[in-house]
Image: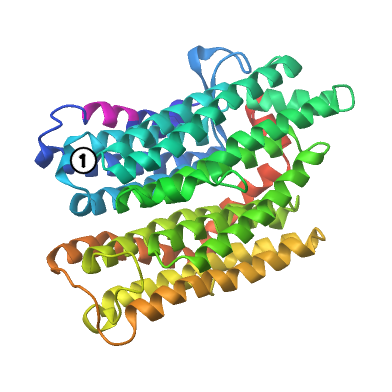
Amino acid sequence: MMTNFALLPILIPFVAAICLLILPHKIKYQRPAAIIWSLVLLAFTIFTFTKVIKEGTLVVTMGDWPVPFGISIVADMLAILLVLTTTVILPFIILYSIKTISVPREEGLYYSLVFFMITGVNGSFLTGDIFNLFVFFEVMLMASYGIIVLGGTRVQLQGIVKYLVFNVIASAFFIVSVAMLYGVVGTLNMADIGQKLSEVQGQADAGLISVIAIFFLFVFGSKAGIFPLFVWLPSSYVSAPMPILALFGGLLTKVGLYAIMRTFSLFFSAEPGIEWSFLRWSAYLTIIIGVIGAMSYRNMKNIVIYNILIAIGVILVGFSSHTLDGMTGSVFYTIHDMLIKVALFMIIGVILFITGTPDIRDFSGLILRYPGLTFIFFIAMLGLAGIPPFSGFIGKLYLIKGVFQSGDIVGGLLILISSLFVLLSLLRIFILGFWGKERGPRHMVYGYRQMMFPTILLVCLTVAFGIGIQFVTPYVQIAADSLANPMIYIQSVLGGN
């Protein structure tokens, strides 16, 4: 279905970012304007989502050039679900930032940079053109560089160096990969690439296709934080203030994850080669490294950051199973993880605000003065661990079913065992920080209550996602169908619905 509605989730945050460049030092205008723009974006994204439900995949081609010659924006169910999750998270982050981000950062165009980053994130999910995936990646990364260095502390500058170096190298490999792919198929449209690669299977050099696939895995894997490309992630993320950490932890790694799922299902699934074995083993090792990190650290930020790695590995194990259930579980778990990781980072931010320390050995007994905080942390912990009926349960159920169906016993066992360690890593925070005799510094409560408002709302949303999962399941299954059967995506872009 040719329609311009697919452009709205990209255009609205871009216009918002431009508007927020005006009067950067007038914080009293910037704050309400950022909230209003985030709600406008959410409203139009919901509208676009309903259009996709009613009319199927929405495709718009720039300048009315025919596909595959024009630049395409494609809102299929998978892309719009991830865009919707992103835009749902945004108002909570902005509300949370008003209290937690410092005024100098706000005056440093923080809100404008956030909307530029959302432009890149939504564009990455929606683009139907491999070169423009690179462009939207760069938009997202440029904005994220700016957001990280706001404040200019030594820790932040040390963190940005690894982030910058890794992403510059990955971007160079991205260009090389796109050039090699263009040399094989002569097109940049992702649906057209998928169709042409399926046609040349057995004729083109299989080794060259595998090399291109591994280059793409390096590029997108470095952004998703898979083993061994995750080394930049903990040190870069831990240096960021909490709302920025929540934003990055919830969104940025998921863009790399989406790019792996989209390109591998479209380009390299007709005759799976060695690249899929690389992907599967990298996912295994990502889970193992995530578990070791989450159990080793006493810093709450690091514990949740390494839980991001566990989730990335779990999702990719499900995706690499090549089963419909495994891919359904991957889509469910990606949406769940985006919501719950942002909620958890927001809760950790509240604890940091109260205690002034991220080290769980330095305080205890929070339950005595903060029972509400204790309760929402407990709920978020159960959600992240996949305890029924919370949001992580159904995704993990599909993942385990699909992975065992494929005969991947190692992957299935790793998912099961990692769930136990996820729970244990958060139970350490719960037992050491919330129980026992009251100990450690305590700050004033007024800011705490302002931070709690968006945090509680987001945790409630994750609970609603788990309890009302039957309303979401049909759409997730449509999204998983397009991963399991890439011809659905190809035909909707090249041949209409």
Q: Nearer the viewer, residue 331 or 352?
A: 352
Q: Is residue 97 above or below residue 255?
A: below
Q: Is residue 272 visible?
A: no
Write the residue at 28% across / 67% down: 351
Camera-nearest residue between 285 and 142: 285
Report the amino acid beneath label 1.
Arg
Instruction: Where is residue 61? Give x, y as percent.
Output: 53, 19
Q: Residue 191: which quarter of the image?
A: top right
User: Horizontal placement of 388 versus 204: left or right?
Assistant: left
Q: Residue at x 59, y 37 (%)?
A: 220
The dominant secondary structure in magenta is helix
Q: Which residue, given by chain and number where applicable, does mark 1 sit on?
A: 105
Residue 190 percent coordinates (x, y):
64, 26
Number of numbered labels in the structure image: 1
The C terminus, quarter of image = top right
Residue 171 shown left or right of residue 339 in the figure = right
**Measuring 15% from the left and 44% from the top, which residue is drawn there?**
103
Classify 443 as above or below 280: below
User: Residue 127, can we see it?
Assistant: yes
In the rendered image, the residue lying farthest to the right is: 202
* Magenta segment boundaries in residue numbering: 14-19
Rendered location of residue 322, percent (x, y): 76, 50
The quadrant the N terminus occupies is: top right
- SS state under label 1: helix
Residue 345 in the image: above or below residue 207: below
Where is residue 133 drawn, in percent x and y?
54, 28
In-image side of 150 versus 161 (left or right): left
